[in-house]
Amino acid sequence: MESLIPFFNPRSIALIGVSTRTGLQAFNILDQVLAGGYQGRIYPVNPRGGTISGLQVYRSVGEIPETPDLAVISTPRTAVPDVVRECAARGIKAIIIITQGFADADEWGRQKQQELLEIIRDTGTRIVGPNTIGVINLYENLNTSFIGFLRQKADTAVICQSGIFLLGAPDFTAGIGLGVDIGNAADVGFTECLAYLGQEPRVKVINLHMEGIKDGLQFTEVARRVTRVKPVLCLKTGYSEAGARAASSHSGSLAGEDHVFSAAFKKCGLMRVRDVEEMYYLNKTFLTYSSMPGRRIAMVTISGGAGIMAVDACSSHGLELAEFSEKTRQKLAALFPTWMEVNNPADIWPAGMARGYLDVLEASLDAILDDPGVDAVLVNSPAYLEPGEDPRMDISSTINKMASRYPEKPVALWIFGAYRPELAARLEKENRVVVYPSPERAMSSLAALYRYLHEIKNRDPLHPPFFSDFQEERIEAILERAAREGLKNLNETALEILAACGIPVLPSAVAQNVEEAVKIAESMGYPVVMKIVSPQISHKSDVGGVRINLNGVRAVKEAWDEIMESVSARLPSATIKGVLIQPYRPAGVEVLLGCKRDPSFGPVLVFGLGGIYTELFRDVSFALAPLNREEALDMIRETRVFRLLQGYRGRPPADTGTLVECLLRLSQLVTLRSEIMEIDINPLLAGPQGAVAVDARIALE
Amino acid sequence: MESLIPFFNPRSIALIGVSTRTGLQAFNILDQVLAGGYQGRIYPVNPRGGTISGLQVYRSVGEIPETPDLAVISTPRTAVPDVVRECAARGIKAIIIITQGFADADEWGRQKQQELLEIIRDTGTRIVGPNTIGVINLYENLNTSFIGFLRQKADTAVICQSGIFLLGAPDFTAGIGLGVDIGNAADVGFTECLAYLGQEPRVKVINLHMEGIKDGLQFTEVARRVTRVKPVLCLKTGYSEAGARAASSHSGSLAGEDHVFSAAFKKCGLMRVRDVEEMYYLNKTFLTYSSMPGRRIAMVTISGGAGIMAVDACSSHGLELAEFSEKTRQKLAALFPTWMEVNNPADIWPAGMARGYLDVLEASLDAILDDPGVDAVLVNSPAYLEPGEDPRMDISSTINKMASRYPEKPVALWIFGAYRPELAARLEKENRVVVYPSPERAMSSLAALYRYLHEIKNRDPLHPPFFSDFQEERIEAILERAAREGLKNLNETALEILAACGIPVLPSAVAQNVEEAVKIAESMGYPVVMKIVSPQISHKSDVGGVRINLNGVRAVKEAWDEIMESVSARLPSATIKGVLIQPYRPAGVEVLLGCKRDPSFGPVLVFGLGGIYTELFRDVSFALAPLNREEALDMIRETRVFRLLQGYRGRPPADTGTLVECLLRLSQLVTLRSEIMEIDINPLLAGPQGAVAVDARIALE
């Protein structure tokens, strides 16, 4: 993390490749560094020498009289490798490469980006970029961009892969304190920057704009630590297929599967935002409010219709409508006309018209905020009149007075009308309240605040359980044999591996001929099930390869013939390895458990509806390994099949405890055995007495 | 519709109950009427007489020297009925009741609201309200509200149930031309106002804020006509359970079921908006753009990262990424650095830095808009510098020049940075382009524009087919018998009714004893299915009341005993009416067809996944009767079960033609027979050779 200090807090900067053209149309970095008021030492470097904007220009890095903390390179792309070499030789530890045309461009660029890493290897020198506008530190009046912008300081930080998030900070993150555009992220990436900004005390909110990430596992670990201390928001772009393709050509990132990012962000408490509008309001929310005791929301409205909109928004974002106490009701009833019912939302307009709008607003808010059953308030009010024109409609002092009297409860505003900007500025001047453009925006922001404070902040570290009863030698033996035989897919032996992990599996044996089938069936006891075994057949029932509920010798013999006939008729080319015999169990709920290894984030577990409808309904949830008990239970709860498991339409509830344990054991297996790329248990039958894996498939590296 | 003219265009107004207090804190309607600059004759009415704001005050309606076109009543609620009586007696045809405290309040209020309707009955007098701020007509400088606000004129109209939509029009609908707050909608409601505004040539977009509606069927008919001519947006509030409760206490509306509103809005081409932010941008969109040839979108970006965000938004709103023609590619390649790939999004920043930003922007836009494969363009650009400060970054003239050169293709803007408001104002000055705050907002707006222009505007009237082969006498006979017997629920006879409508049903007969069962089974041919018949049992399989695949006399006899045993063990109190016998068919796809009559919108048809998973997955679609062929097909396509029907996992595709016909016949049945409140066909088995209804239930009035 120390290696990032010179990027964010350099005492001196070399600007290499700085243009001699300055002024409005020059896009000259030196202009911006000077205009910002940076107080460190600045060394422009350009082979022509001379002076630019009154500063002496050095012809090369070697000529600079000291070793600068940071070098910012904006030469043409062909010159970059040599300049980096010079910088490293000079002992410069931090280099920003502004220049585009590397992994973001063509084959030449991809090779040269690799070469840059070779150059700095073992030198202790670090690179931000290429294809970046560098860093911004408004606490030190520093920015390395080539374009002018309004420097609106706020205690937010940004780590992005596009400069617009630094330059557009007033619009996207309500201002900025510290920021870095990691560009192609050839060297310095999200993980280190996040760790750095996580421990920076001035930063209250961290924002990520992410196109892709290579070190997902380390990132998740760091992010889990940082989110315990401060909120981290993430705009993950390239979530659509077309967007992912565009991302790969922009910063050379591989976007990966979107559900994996969602699972990763969930695991580490990172809050995903959908767009820049949401990002902006969440930054304002976290910069302003630091407490919210619960999720019960009161509304003070000037219109019944607006109140309904607020109630809709409240419900749809998982917040609750506060119930006023008897005391609060009495206080409000004393203000309201007698014909008006006192309710949440509290419609203060009729009372306000009769008794003075500001007085009624203050008295209502005071009563409501004092109510222990209220955790936050949304006030809607008009901004129709020029605030100076009618003192009764300028609610800013009333609101701020109440907000400062009840600092532990957010007072949120939704105002509307043509003078919104002016009134909003007055309301927000003391940084006590946030003005939102709609009740939806207000409620979604309060919901995020609640979620952060109560579900993410200060939460316990992960404690994945460890099962010591794994038969590791048996697992080892099966996987070794598979490796020796060059097998990539385990079908029948997959169940053996699961059994060795302590996951209950249905007993099974493969018969090579009808006599063996009868013998196995007799030893298992009737009824039995028979399934074709063939490397070419994965959907066995689709080719008539499955017979169930077989009740005796004759049924087993008939089933054998039928299966062979049907399979050879429909798939004559299939190699038949035999027929699998299992005891027939009355159907429990068919669920699916599985895992797929992501190149960046490692094993991703899946749980959901099993059987033939799996693909149709995609009723599945994902989570990154290693799981703890709560995460496993969450995975189950997030699916609709959970309702089936709870005892749908009068059936007895299934034993979810066993399912949780199956998920945890699966998680331990894939964490231990990195050669397992994919596991698919489908179906696993979940019933009141437990669960049992019926069919499974494992794909190896 | 003529009766609405005096509301929107009165030549004279009586203001009844106007206060003698005027000025800033008085909330005096007369102040607002005068401040607005209304040119008609104004008659203040107050028993005290005298003058207010220089106008003579009349002591009663009778004293006014002419019959005014419009009366606006703001007396206390107890005085309202008498005043309305006076107005009607005086021959005033249009009355606005501002006063609150009617159906929006208590029992007294609900009764008095009813009384008001009695008073005007047969007088030709119409009422808007109570509980309203009345009307606004900025073409005539008229508004009847008691609060001052900025009068921002735009060619939009508003019909609302809360005054904030008139007063907050600059924020919600980008200004307003004509508007009416129908309040409790005791008399004048959405339907008439929509018809009126639909034929008003100055209005380009109509906005509805709806809490509930009583005459859903008539409304749908009118809305279908109006949406063929101009876009109608609807913010339906009270969509959450809590919101619906709040709506019922606000305007006395019964909110109804939300999916019924969605189905109704879809049927009539009304575009539902989720919140006021969306409403605002759609108004701007429809006020600005009137053409968009297709859905292929090009993007011009100053940042690869911003381009990716635009691509994500484009995909997620159902738009397509335009493919540039070879000619366009060549034009762009000539501008771009050699290492840059030419692609959509077109990243013009590197070229702009080298060759001048505005020149490159203009040349790129010209090339792209000229491409016949491009239907609209989104441009993103920074608003970092004070626009006056750097002429190269003020894109407003370039953009407007290109927008006017290609008027048939929308040029949409996403700009960011601290000077966004200033640059946006310059860009939008000529009303050629809209500036959006995010790519999501831009794409969702363009998607709505496309949808309106290509899927709603000018579309053909509904042509529900008529099947002349209905056995109407048979249906009549069954329903009459049920009425005679006082039956509310038809179970076994439901299939008979469906058969009489030409819907294929599985033959079935009810056996009273085991001998009858055998006889029926023998005549149907084996295998058969047996199901318990009992008014107390709706989920037959849950009580062991179903046996399938019975292959002979012995199986039928055993099944009879098992069913009786199981049912009497689990539900000893059930009255057994016999056992239903049907031929056993191999399972097709189990779908559900049904209908439920909504008190406001009439019969609502439903289609979806049948069988035991119906409730779990809620994979259903809804549509209002009467259906045409396309709507019926849409219903099927909207569900996931459609994928099953198309031939899931290698199964032969089902005959969707028959399903469409079943839906159409069902639609005709519920349109003909208004005593049918609910029909539930579940399952209907859909296979490659057709479909057959297996089980059905009809609920009568």
Image (cartoon, coloured by chain):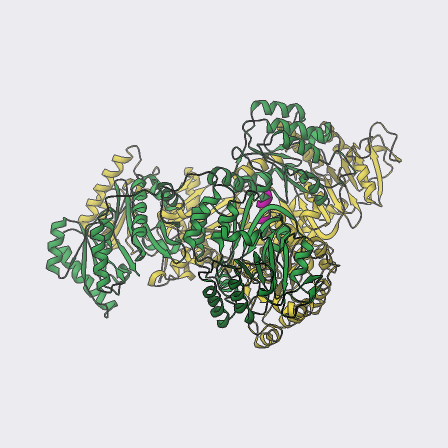
Chain colours: A green, B yellow
- In the picture, residue A44 is in which quadrant? bottom right
Asked if residue B646 is among those painted magenta in the image, a careful observer would answer no
Residue A73 at x, y percent in the picture: 58, 64
- The answer, for residue B65, to whether it is visible in the render is yes
Q: Position of residue B282 (x, y in %)?
A: 64, 54
B404 shown above or below A673: below
Look at the picture and state if B2 lies above or below A302: below
Quadrant of the image containing the C terminus of chain A:
bottom left
Question: B376 or A701, which is in the foreground?
Answer: A701
Does residue B566 appear to the left or right of B222 in the view shown? left
> Residue B232: x, y in percent?
64, 53
Image: magenta residue range: A279-285
**Residue A73 or residue B633, whichever sits in front:** A73
Of B10 and A479, nearer the camera is A479
Residue A87 occupies quadrant:
bottom right
Name the chief secondary structure element in magenta: helix
